[in-house]
Image (tube, rainbow, N blue to C red):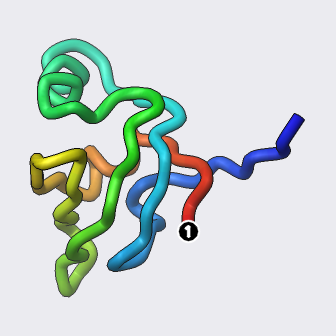
Amino acid sequence: MKNETMTLLSACTKGGIATVAKIKATGALKQRLISFGLMKGAEVIMLECGMTKSTYEIKIGNVSIALRREEAELVEVSDVH
């Protein structure tokens, strides 16, 4: 079995690609993220990190969304490259 290291989406760098391992958000926020395709197993590309790293622009499939740092810290990713 492959030993995967988990990290937070907020730790990814511009141009990085990762696989969503777990979403720790709950309620309406979790449903909103899922509606954009951000769910376990989805591949995510980090498009931009704000100057202060307070906002992140990611791409999931054909959808680009912006997340606040607090939201990005609720998403665990693996297989980061």
From the viewer's perspective, is residue 45 above or below residue 34?
below
Furthest-top residue in view? Answer: 27
User: With respect to residue 80, does 27 lie above or below?
Assistant: above
Residue 21 in percent (x, y) is at: 53, 35
Q: How many marks?
A: 1
The residue sitting at 21% across, 68% down in the picture is 54
Instruction: Estimate the x, y position of residue 41 in percent, counting from the top left.
Output: 46, 32
Q: In what element is the residue under mark 1?
A: loop
Q: Quadrant of residue 7?
A: bottom right
Q: Nearer the viewer, residue 65 or 62?
A: 62
Depth check, front residue: 81 or 55: 81
Figure check: 66 above or below 71:
below
Which quadrant of the figure contains the C terminus? Answer: bottom right
* Left or right: 43 in relation to 57: right
Residue shown at 41% from the left, 76% from the top: 13
Q: Could you tell me which residue is drawn at 33 percent across and 27 percent down?
A: 25
Residue identifier under label 1:
81
Residue drawn 35% across the image and 28% down it: 39
